[in-house]
Amino acid sequence: MKKVSESTVARLSVYLRLLTELSGAGVTTLASEELARRCGTSAAQVRKDLSFFGTFGKRGLGYSVPELTSALRGILGLERRWRVALIGAGKIGAALMAYQDFRRQGFDIVAVFDADPAKVGREWHGLVVQSDADLQRELERIEIAIVAVPAEAAQTVVNRVIEAGVRAILNFAPTKLSVPDHVAVKTVNMALELEGLSYALVNEARGSRRVTSRPAASRG
Amino acid sequence: MKKVSESTVARLSVYLRLLTELSGAGVTTLASEELARRCGTSAAQVRKDLSFFGTFGKRGLGYSVPELTSALRGILGLERRWRVALIGAGKIGAALMAYQDFRRQGFDIVAVFDADPAKVGREWHGLVVQSDADLQRELERIEIAIVAVPAEAAQTVVNRVIEAGVRAILNFAPTKLSVPDHVAVKTVNMALELEGLSYALVNEARGSRRVTSRPAASRG
DNA sequence: TTGGGATTGTGAATGGTTTCACAAATCCGC
DNA sequence: GCGGATTTGTGAAACCATTCACAATCCCAA
């Protein structure tokens, strides 16, 4: 089986979002050209992306919206729900708890941990904050860990989370995490994006260096 | 002048963060090998990244931490402060206001806008929320706009922001934005990252497709 | 049932990024 | 100052992702 790039997987998510929207609007069929236009890519790219996983379209007609939706949900592993633990009951964590848009997509935050004894045991956004010390024991039934702790603490937390058997981490700490090959990490780093904009602004102003394609989160 | 990829710019930010940390720890000199190891890349990559902008190292010795720090800050446009407007005083916006880590990096949120009349005029995280209707007039001295509104409203907001002369946008809405060539957009999309993890988990489980490098935000 | 128009799926070509490998440069001990 | 050890900067090679281009397929109307 061929290798699939992270870029491709990210685009599949984008396609799925559009399909879901169109489905609600009653659209039943869609050509790669239109799909591409609305997702900011090219028709060839769409077809190539899908071709890694099978053939989903009808020549001369396009893709059936419900069928492709279902196929993408399967590919992305969204036919089931995932149990997520939030580690770090701070500002970022609070925003994530409040912004429960993930739940719609199948991600349930079912546990919250924090190192601060003052927070442990208290109810917080509908869950009781648990002690960091209980991580090992409590993470048994967790598939994804969201790490929202200060940078200094992140690697330690990640080590423990991995030891508890978690194989997927969404990292909000602005730091490089070392993890074994079988663990997937995605990092969200707003400061990094802002600096990218800052770079664009100063380079727009003086002489216009051109910026091309795009970077990717680490895995392993 | 050569093209510089977004990957390269993102890595420069990562290098800078490490250098700042090491500087605090009193480290004065650093080889590309060590820099790379601690940033999760390769020594050749580090040297290539820097080579786009000049020569900063001493052969046989490595890089002077203060000098490289200063050079990177210059390249990334971080020697000045940037005026940022937040558009959308909702959950995500609140998290950003609370998490004022950007301020340390030189990004000041100096204005907040919202479409909800109930919010306009009220103080919110230290600023008075302004009306969306005032966007045009108020954005004059703003360089970066953070778009934290619902997906449906995002494109409309972005159009107005661009019309007001803003040329850099940090987008939190899970939607593709169309912008002219001279406007830089970076999108932060947590749902997308989670779906990437979901994909990794199901593919780890069955047959292990291997995932390679990574995607990039759009510009133009 | 056949023909015309549309659109997919994919090998080949292109373009871009990362890695390799080594000459040039620097430091340091003697 | 000289020689050896070290590390940079960079062209060339390898690798990966995107775009191109077209045969294969399908729908539909007549």
Image (cartoon, coloured by chain):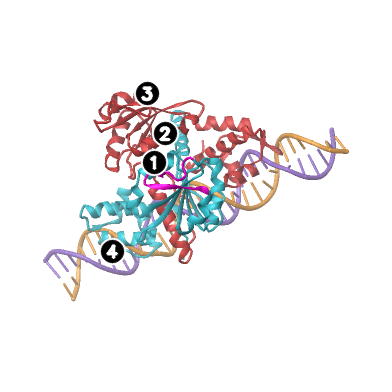
Chain colours: A cyan, B red, C orange, D purple
Q: In the picture, residue A58 is in which quadrant?
A: bottom left
Q: Looking at the picture, does residue C2 appear above or below residue B76?
A: below
Left or right: A107, with A207 as reference point = left
Q: Image point 28% across, 64% down: which residue?
A: A59
- Please report the bounds of the magenta region as a residue range: A118-132
Tag 2: residue type?
Ala
Question: CA gap, disc 4 to disc 2?
Answer: 52 Å
Q: Nearer the viewer, residue A128 or A199?
A: A128
State how far apart marks 2 and 1 are (Cα).
Answer: 10 Å
Observer-side mark, 3 or 4, equals 3
* Residue, disc 3: B141
Q: Nearer the viewer, mark 1 or mark 4?
A: 1
Disc 3 or 2, which lies upstream in sequence? 2
Q: Are marks 3 and 2 on the same chain?
A: yes
- Give the labeled residue for mark 2: B98
The answer to whether residue A46 is visible is yes
B136 horizontally vs B15: left or right:
left
Chain identifier of the residue bearing label 4 in the image: A
Near mark 2 (Cα within 10 A), the count class, few <14, some 14-19 or many ≥20, is: some
* Label 4 neighbour load within 10 Å: few <14, some 14-19, many 20+: few
Name the front one of labels 3 and 2: 2
Q: Is residue A128 magenta?
A: yes
Give the image location of residue B203, x and y in percent.
45, 62
> What kind of residue is marked 1?
Ala
- Report x, y in % for residue A169: 48, 51
Label 1 with label 3: CB-CB less than 8 Å = no
The label number, if any, that marks residue A95 in the structure image:
1
Of badges 1 and 3, the one in the foreground is 1
